[in-house]
Image: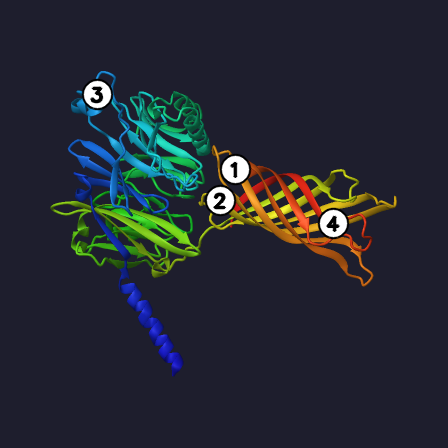
């Protein structure tokens, strides 16, 4: 009987979940109260879900703002400089002659030294459109391109290692690709420290370096879309609302808002080219589910889409796209729920804290009076998915020299080798913290005070906590504290091996070669609670220092 009740309750829970999903911790911000006048074009969430970029259209002009979701404050992101002949841009005649075009923004997918970066396009004070970077925390705007062409739709790769964009000219469209985004941030840091008060718009050294590293993926006289295959973009030509020459191996997302490319859990496309009124695709069998949603929509998780419900009011989630799709309405406990038919932009960001995950939704919508942004959370389990926090694991090998007190090595440095394994539970934190295990081996050899030759093998194992801070995006000094044991190969009279507790402190420098490979130089001083060789009493080695050089490799767990 009890089993029947359990089954009945489980069925009711599943049925209740399939009826609707509640969006939790809902917050609504009236943009008019923040001084933002106009019509919302597009919204994007920062990687830590603390800020949102908002693109507002007023007449023919489009303006970019960054909204602090916690403090409910907005800041304009405008790269226009003060012209020499005029007191400011607002007092120059260019203000009335040139249409402002700021936007098409995309956040760098992770924090850099605890800071947030936004890549966007702007026409500055001319007709051309260039790429800019904006540091939200230091309010610095840096120009990346300075050509006569129009650069549009910048997008970071999902891992943040690459930047792609469309370059438009009279000859056609080009998909440009910058393969090493870390170089950009190193150049930025170098410029900032050399000339901290330099106008970022005149960073000619950076724009020259950026142009020299660009790779052209595709040229086409038709509009070009692109999706990511790893950290490399793949170009697709779009013509007459149809996507052509499409490779279905690894679809992710595209650059233009009316056209959407997504990747399902099995690596096959689930949405291809969705227009404002109806979905368009030459692969209709892959997209029949999306016909229940209207533009705009966005992809969340590995197998779900959230968008406007075509058959009803408000928003809904389509889950299990590739397997028996299910439409689940979203419930918003807000008086503006009836206005969600006027949704103009949707964005989603996955966040994890201690293994718990959330899908953070950001909505931009308008009423007859004002425009709003609204954000809330959906639990992954509500749509049959799971999100686990990613941690980074470091593995490394080292070699160096150790010097011991007493007569263990006759006062000389002895060769030493070691291995380590580290875990970074919070890879985006600043300073970065690692919890590690290191094992080292050295051969103690020499002569005692009685001129007797000896040879011992010493093994040390230590657990340590290490804190480092990335400097100039290339150098990372760090400090550590450790606790472990030291064991000698010599056995006592009772058959046991001599071992003792050891304490240690140290520090060093890590040189970033690539995002996944680093060279580490460090020194450690360790103190043994007991003499390491109690059987002979001499030589005594109760403390030792070591200088090591190692190679570290980082991989996600």
Q: Earlier in the sequence, mark 1 or mark 3?
A: 3
Few, some or many C-alpha atoms within 10 Å of disc 4 (few <14, some 14-19, many ≥20)? some
Q: Position of residue 510 (x, y in %)?
A: 56, 37
Q: Earlier in the sequence, mark 4 or mark 3?
A: 3
What residue is shown with label 2? 432
Q: Position of residue 186 (x, y in %)?
A: 46, 30
Q: CA distance from mark 1 to mark 3?
A: 43 Å
**Res 490 → quadrant:** bottom right
**Res 38 → quadrant:** top left
**Is residue 480 shown above or below 65?**
below
- Secondary structure category for the residue under label 3: loop
User: Position of 548 compared to 70: left or right?
Assistant: right
Q: Which mark is residue 343?
A: none
Q: Position of residue 168 (x, y in %)?
A: 31, 26
For this orientation, the residue located farthest to the top is 85
Q: CA distance from mark 4 to mark 3?
A: 73 Å
Q: Earlier in the sequence, mark 2 or mark 3?
A: 3
Few, some or many C-alpha atoms within 10 Å of disc 3 (few <14, some 14-19, many ≥20)? few
What residue is shown with label 4? 458
Q: CA distance from mark 2 to mark 3?
A: 44 Å
- Secondary structure category for the residue under label 2: strand
Could you tell me if residue 111 is visible in this image? Answer: yes
- Secondary structure category for the residue under label 1: strand
Query: Is there CB contact under 8 Å for labels 2 and 3?
Result: no
Q: Which mark is residue 476?
A: 1
Q: Earlier in the sequence, mark 1 or mark 4?
A: 4
Q: CA distance from mark 2 to mark 1?
A: 10 Å
Query: Is there CB contact under 8 Å for labels 2 and 1?
Result: yes
**Res 448 → quadrant:** top right
What residue is shown with label 3? 87
């Amino acid at each position: 009987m009890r089993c029947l009740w359990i089954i009945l309750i489980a069925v009711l829970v599943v049925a209740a979940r399939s009826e609707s999903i509640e969006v939790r911790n809902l917050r609504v911000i009236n943009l008019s109260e923040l001084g933002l006048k106009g019509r919302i074009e597009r919204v994007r969430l920062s990687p830590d879900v603390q800020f949102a970029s908002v693109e507002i259209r007023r007449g023919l002009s489009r303006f970019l703002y960054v909204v602090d979701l916690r403090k409910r404050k907005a800041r304009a992101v405008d790269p226009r400089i003060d012209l020499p002949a005029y007191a400011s841009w607002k007092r120059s005649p260019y203000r009335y002659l040139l249409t402002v075009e700021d936007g098409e923004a995309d956040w760098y997918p992770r924090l850099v030294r605890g800071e947030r970066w936004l890549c966007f396009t702007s026409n500055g004070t001319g007709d051309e459109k260039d790429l800019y970077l904006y540091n939200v925390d230091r309010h610095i705007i840096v120009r990346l391109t300075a050509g006569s062409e129009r650069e549009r739709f910048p997008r970071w790769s999902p891992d943040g290692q690459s930047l792609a964009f469309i370059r438009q000219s009279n000859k056609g469209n080009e998909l440009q690709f910058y393969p090493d985004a870390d170089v950009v941030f190193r150049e930025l840091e170098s410029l900032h420290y050399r000339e901290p008060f330099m106008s970022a718009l005149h960073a000619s050294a950076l724009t020259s370096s950026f142009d020299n590293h660009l790779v052209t993926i595709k040229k086409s006289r038709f509009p070009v879309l692109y999706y990511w295959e790893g950290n490399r973009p793949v170009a697709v030509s779009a013509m007459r609302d149809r996507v052509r020459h499409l490779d279905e191996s690894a679809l992710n997302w595209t650059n233009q808002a009316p056209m959407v490319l997504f990747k399902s859990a099995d690596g096959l496309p689930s949405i291809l080219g969705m227009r404002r009124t109806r979905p368009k695709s030459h692969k209709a069998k892959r997209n029949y589910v999306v016909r229940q949603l209207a533009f705009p929509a966005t992809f969340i998780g590995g197998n779900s889409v959230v968008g406007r419900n075509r058959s009803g009011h408000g928003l809904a989630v389509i889950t299990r796209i590739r397997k028996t799709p299910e439409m689940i309405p979203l419930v918003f406990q807000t008086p503006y729920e009836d206005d969600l038919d006027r949704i103009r932009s949707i964005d989603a960001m996955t966040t994890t804290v201690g293994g718990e995950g959330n899908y953070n939704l950001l909505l931009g919508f308008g009423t007859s009076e004002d425009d709003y942004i609204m954000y809330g959370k959906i639990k992954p389990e509500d749509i049959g998915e799971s999100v686990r926090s990613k941690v980074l694991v470091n593995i490394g090998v080292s070699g160096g020299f150790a010097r011991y007190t007493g007569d263990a090595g006759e006062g000389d440095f002895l060769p030493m080798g070691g291995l380590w394994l580290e875990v970074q539970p919070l890879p985006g934190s600043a300073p970065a913290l690692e919890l590690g295990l290191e094992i080292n081996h050295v051969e103690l050899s020499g002569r005692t005070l009685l001129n007797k030759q000896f040879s011992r093998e010493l093994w040390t194992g230590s657990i340590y906590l290490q804190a480092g801070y990335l400097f100039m995006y290339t150098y990372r000094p760090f400090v550590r504290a450790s606790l472990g044991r030291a064991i000698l190969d010599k056995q006592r009279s009772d058959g046991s091996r001599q071992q003792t507790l050891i304490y240690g402190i140290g520090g060093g420098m890590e040189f970033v070669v690539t995002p996944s490979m680093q060279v580490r130089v460090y020194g450690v001083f360790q103190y043994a609670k007991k003499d390491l060789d109690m059987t002979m009493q001499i030589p005594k080695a109760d403390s030792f220092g070591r200088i090591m050089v190692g190679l570290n490799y980082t991989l996600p767990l």
